[in-house]
Amino acid sequence: MAKVYTPSNLGGVQFDAIISRDRAYEAEVPTYPVEDGYKVSDAVLRGPLSLSVTAFISNSPITWRRQLGNSQNRVSRVCKQLEKLYFSGDPVTFTSGNKVYRNMALVSLTIPENAEMMNAVEVSFQLQQVEITKSKTTTIPASYGASGTTGESGGTASTTEEKKEGFLSKACSLLFGLFKK
C-alpha cells in the first residue's frame, strides 16, 4: 500500500480521516414494446460515477497535526466550508489516499445538528461525477431550405460532443433508430 502524504481533501476542505469511501456504478437498459407485447432492449446507458463518503473532523487532529493544526473551532469552520461548497454548486476535486476524483458535484451533505459545539464529528456526503462538454454552433446553409411555412431562415444549430464507449453507446438505440425513419 502506498504511503499517503496529504490529508483527504474535498475542494480545499481537509479531513482528519476518511472512515468509508464507496463507489457506485449504475446503468439503465431502456426497453421498447414490439407487436407481440414483448419488450426488447438493445442498449446500455451508463450513468456517472457516484461516491458515498463518511469523513472525520476534529478540533485536535492526531494524524495530520502538522498540516491541520489544533484549533478550538476547527470543526465549526470545516462544517461551514462544506456547506459553502454544497451551496456553490461548482464541481470540485476529491482526493483520498492515492485516488483523485475530478469534476465531482456535491449532491448530498449530512452534518450533525450540533456539530459546531462538538470537538469531533463525522460528516457524510455523496458525490456524483459531472461530464463537462463544450458546445459548437454552426450556420445552416441556405441550400437546406427555409423554416416552416413562413419561409424564413432556419437559424443556427447547436451540437455537443458525445463520449463514445463501445458500439452500443450512441445518441439513440439501434431499434429506435430503425423506427425513427
Image: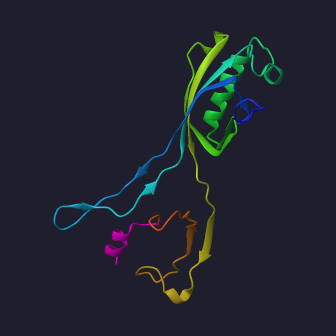
Judging depth in this view, the residue of 30 and 89 nearest the camera is 30
Which residue is found at the position 54% from the left and 64% from the top? Answer: 164
Q: Is residue 148 left or right of residue 132?
A: left
- Residue 89 in percent (x, y) is at 61, 40
Q: Which of the 4 image quadrants contains residue 114? A: top right
Q: Is residue 179 magenta?
A: yes
Quadrant into which the C terminus falls = bottom left
Q: Which of the 4 image quadrants contains residue 20? A: top right
- Residue 126 in percent (x, y) is at 54, 34
Q: Can you say whether 88 is above or below 59 in the image? A: below
Furthest residue in direction bottom, as rendered: 143
Q: Which of the 4 image quadrants contains residue 175? A: bottom left
Furthest residue in direction front, as rendered: 1
Q: Can you say whether 120 is above or below 68 in the image? A: above
Judging depth in this view, the residue of 180 and 98 nearest the camera is 98
| Colour mapping | rainbow
Which residue is found at the position 22% from the left and 66% from the top? Answer: 34
Judging depth in this view, the residue of 86 and 161 nearest the camera is 161
Q: Is residue 107 left or right of residue 100?
A: left
Which residue is found at the position 74% from the left and 32% from the top? Answer: 4
Q: Which residues are magenta?
A: 171-181
How many discs mark residues in the rendered view? Answer: 0
Quadrant into which the N terminus falls = top right
- Residue 54 in percent (x, y) is at 58, 26
- Residue 119 in percent (x, y) is at 67, 10
Furthest residue in direction right, as rendered: 66
Which residue is found at the position 35% from the left and 57% from the top? Answer: 30
Q: Can you say whether 29 is above or below 20 in the image? A: below
Q: Is residue 127 magenta?
A: no
